[in-house]
Image: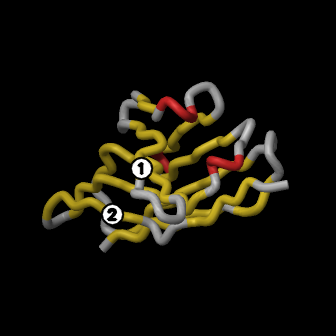
Amino acid sequence: QVQLVELGGGLVQPGGSLRLSCAASGSILRIYTMAWYRQAPGKQRELVASITSAGSTVYTDSVKGRFTISRDNAKNTMYLQMNILKPEDTAVYFCYADVQIPWGRRNYWGQGTQVTVSS
């Protein structure tokens, strides 16, 4: 099995910054795409940003220019640097990974970390 552990959420004022991390561990042969999703109260989960193993990135329009996704393949870890945070960024942020394990290819999710942007 594979575990994804997110760290770095918290309370920040508008205009502030936070850095999230997602560390994958377990029976990992290879990690393909990793991504950050978020879900605000009463809303559907949405993609925030994704990154392939080669480093290609995709961002949702609302975070372009403010958020940066990155990964360290040697550490099986992904990051999300969030700058110029806005109240509308408040949500639970989830880590996602597409993983090759010995007995197949599976998708995994982290438990989520709360990000609250408020004065």
Look at the picture and state if 33 lies above or below 54.
below
Q: What residue type is labelled 1?
A: Glu
SS class, disc 1? strand
x, y percent for residue 92: 55, 62
Task: Pinpoint residue 64: horizontal percent, then vertical percent.
Answer: 56, 28
On screen, residue 65 above or below 84: above
Answer with mark 1 or mark 2, whichever residue precedes in sequence: 1
Would residue 43 appear left or right of 8 to someone viewing this image? left
The amino acid at mark 2 is Tyr
Q: What element carries label 2?
A: strand
Q: In this view, does 102 lie to the left or right of 118?
A: left
Q: On the image, numbered disc 1 is attached to which residue? A: 46
Q: Nearer the viewer, residue 105 or 92?
A: 92
Q: Residue at x 39, y 47 (%)?
A: 34
Question: Which of the 4 quarters of the picture holds residue 97?
Answer: bottom left
Residue 13 vs residue 70, the one in the foreground: 13
Q: Position of residue 73 (x, y in %)?
A: 45, 44
Query: Which residue is at a point 72% across and 38% down the rendered structure image?
Result: 83
Q: Would you name the residue on which mark 2 appears?
A: 108
Please, which residue is most extreme toward the front here? 42
